[in-house]
Image (tube, grey):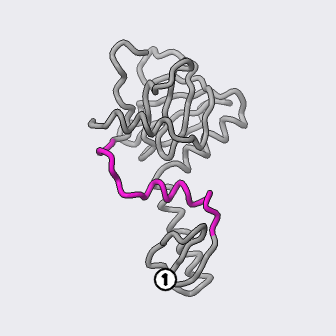
């Protein structure tokens, strides 16, 4: 896989939708649970050693499944390799539920389905077909009809649909630096 490490590190410093210290176990056999600072930024899940500023790794949350394992734990696996799972342990069942929902909403696939749903809802209300969405202040201009939508709801979609300026990604974690755990 190819990636631009500087851009990835810059993205990891952006404000997070969610961040917490969780137990994390990688996909390798015999991997042990380690405390990691886990940070969700757009559709990347970064994980850090608790005492370091640079990420140990990142998961691109596309074509993945978030599954509850046991109470207070969940896993992330990817469609291309469902046996390769990253396990996470939360401090409470509520925290686990919050993380699972946030991770499911983070993917482009979810945002695309949401956009299609809202386009259909707008069509039902206005009777007009939505050819496209254009940002207009804090609202949207849809097929000539003004529609106020909370910017916080649209922010993840707007960020994810910006023209790509990064190198292509696949859905596995980026390689670790030599000598890191």
Tell me what residue is drawn at x 69 percent, y 27 percent.
91
User: Does the magenta portion include 152?
Assistant: yes
Tell me what residue is drawn at x 44 percent, y 36 percent.
59
Residue 154: x and y in percent read 56, 60
Residue 38: x and y in percent read 55, 30
Q: Which residue is mark 1?
A: 129
Q: Label 1 crowding class (10 Å Cα cut-off): few <14, some 14-19, many 20+?
A: few
Task: Give the quadrant of residue 121.
Answer: bottom right
Task: Check the image and report above or below for 46 versus 48.
Answer: below
Residue 70: x and y in percent read 63, 29
Q: Secondary structure at mark 1?
A: loop
The image quadrant where one finds the C terminus is: top left
Task: Give the quadrant of residue 132.
Answer: bottom left
The image quadrant where one finds the N terminus is: top left
What is the span of residues highlighted in magenta in the rendered image? 149-169
Q: Nearer the viewer, residue 121 or 2?
A: 2
User: Does the magenta portion include 44?
Assistant: no
Task: Check the image and report above or below for 135 versus 167.
Answer: below
Left or right placement of residue 106 versus residue 169 in this view:
right
Left or right placement of residue 14 versus residue 147 in this view:
left
Task: Check the image and report above or below for 37 versus 18.
Answer: above
Residue at the left extreme? 2
């Amino acid at each position: 896989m190819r990636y631009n490490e500087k851009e990835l590190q810059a993205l990891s410093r952006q404000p997070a939708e969610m961040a917490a210290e969780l137990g994390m176990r990688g996909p390798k056999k015999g991997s042990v649970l380690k405390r990691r600072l886990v940070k969700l930024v757009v559709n990347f899940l970064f994980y850090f050693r608790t005492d370091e500023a640079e990420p140990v790794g990142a998961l691109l949350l596309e074509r993945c499944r978030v599954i509850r394992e046991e109470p207070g734990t969940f896993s992330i696996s990817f469609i291309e390799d469902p046996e390769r799972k990253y396990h996470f342990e939360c401090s409470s069942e509520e925290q686990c539920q919050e993380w699972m929902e946030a991770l499911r909403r983070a993917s482009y696939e979810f945002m695309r389905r949401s956009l299609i749903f809202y386009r259909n809802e707008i069509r039902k209300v206005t009777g007009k077909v939505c050819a496209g969405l254009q940002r207009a202040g804090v609202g949207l201009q849809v097929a000539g009809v003004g529609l106020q939508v909370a910017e916080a709801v649209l922010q993840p979609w707007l960020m994810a649909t910006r023209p790509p300026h990064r190198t292509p990604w696949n859905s596995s974690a980026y390689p670790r630096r030599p000598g890191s755990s």
